[in-house]
Amino acid sequence: MVEIRLTPRADRDAVEGIRHDAGGAARLAVRVTAAPSDGAANAALIALLSRRWHLPKSAFALVEGESARAKRLSVTASGARLAAALQDLTEVS
């Protein structure tokens, strides 16, 4: 599972790294230019992570937070691909 803090209607699409919320929980901060209507921001989030981590969109499933900024995504991939995604997270933090 990947915990996300999504900012829709941003000036650019970007993965900004790990941030801690007020409660101390670590979340991946992501910005997308899409508006949060009709699932557009969620689709943009999955498309961005798919491109960045070189995984198919079908590898991602929104588990929680469909209409909230705090989201939880399930990612299904081989161990090597998940390791590469985790490496990417440490590089942007």
Image (spheres, rainbow, N blue to C red):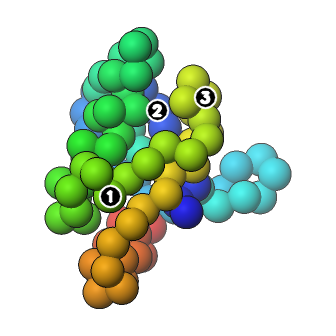
**Residue wearing tag 2:** 7
In the rendered image, which quarter is residue 36 located in? top left
Task: Give 38 or 87, whichever is nearer the viewer.
Answer: 38
Which of the two marks, 2 or 3, is nearer to us in this view? 3
* Disc 1 residue type (three-letter): Ala
Q: Earlier in the sequence, mark 2 or mark 1?
A: 2
Residue 91 vertical placement versus 63 (above, below): below
Label 2's element? strand
Q: How many marks?
A: 3
Between residues 82 and 93, which one lies in front from this camera angle? 82
Is 37 placed left or right of 34 in the picture?
right
Residue bearing the label numbered 1: 59
What is the crowding at mark 3: few (fewer than 14 residues within 10 Å), some, or many (at least 20)? Answer: few
Give the percent coordinates (x, y) of residue 25.
72, 58
**Crowd around label 1: few <14 · some 14–19 · many ≥20 (10 Å):** few
Residue 16 visible to an observer of this rendering: yes
Q: Which residue is mark 3?
A: 68
Label at residue 44:
none
Quadrant of residue 65 within the rendered picture: top right
User: Mark 3 belongs to which amino acid?
Assistant: Ala
Furthest-top residue in view? Answer: 37
- List x then y, in percent, for residue 31: 38, 38
Q: Earlier in the sequence, mark 2 or mark 3?
A: 2
